[in-house]
Image (cartoon, rainbow, N blue to C red):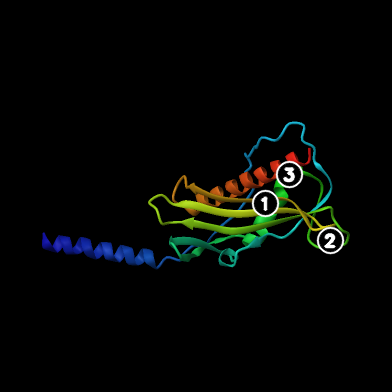
Amino acid sequence: MKKNMLLIIFLALLFSGCRSSQPITQKHYLLELPADYEGSWPEQATILPGTCLIASTEIAIAYATHQIAVREDSHQIRYFSFNEWAIRPEQAFTRLVLDFFEKYPVFEHLRYGRVTHPTDYVLDTRVIVVELDAREDDFQARLEVHFSLTRPEDDQVLQSYRAERIETLESIDLNSFAKAVSHMFAEELHAFSVKVLENNR
């Protein structure tokens, strides 16, 4: 009986050793505009005439790399080693903004990148926090974002909007995390856009 028990333990150790020698798969995650997202818009709202420059998104330094941040304590984060953003957050969030306004026109024309002629508006986006919060039993996606629309002609801020969001994940995996971040960002960009349109009436 004792011999059989030792054999079972040995086989278990051998199996675990074989598993640990398998190559680790690198996984990458995308931030994308939710395909099924539909927000309500003000009645009789008209798009803003002129051209809006979509500035590159500014990301807080702690979250600006390919690595995905996990909050483990009040002032402690760590980064996943084999799970990363497929595209740097600066580019991914900027693409989200462009995709959103191409699908839901708020401005007559959009520009991005180097612009040779002055534009009527500039939209600045700043992501202050984007992390997986692992401090509770249920993992949560955290997003803090700030949008600002200015008129370059006189540097007047036409609309400013800041949001802090926390969403409990559907399941404990990074795909759900990326999905939650994408959805929260789209919702807050939509809320900002509604304010812009309402002020344009």
* Location of residue 22 by image quarter: bottom left
Q: Position of residue 148 (x, y in %)?
A: 70, 54
In the rendered structure, which amino acid carries the disc numbered 3?
Val
Front one among 87 and 43: 43
Disc 2 packing (10 Å; few <14; some 14–19; many ≥20)? few
Which tag is nearer the camera, tag 1 or tag 3?
A: 3
- Left or right: residue 126 versus residue 104 is left
Element type at mark 3: helix
Task: Give the percent coordinates (x, y) of residue 34.
Answer: 62, 44
- Type of the residue with mark 1: Leu
The residue shown at (55%, 48%) is 179
Above or below, 156 against 183 in this view is below
Looking at the rendered structure, which numbered label has been put on residue 115? Answer: 2
| N-terminal-most mark, 2 or 3 | 2
Near-viewer residue (75 or 110): 75
Quarter of the picture holding the C terminus: top right
Q: Can you identify the residue that label 3 sits on?
A: 196
Image position, residue 181 (x, y; %) = 56, 51
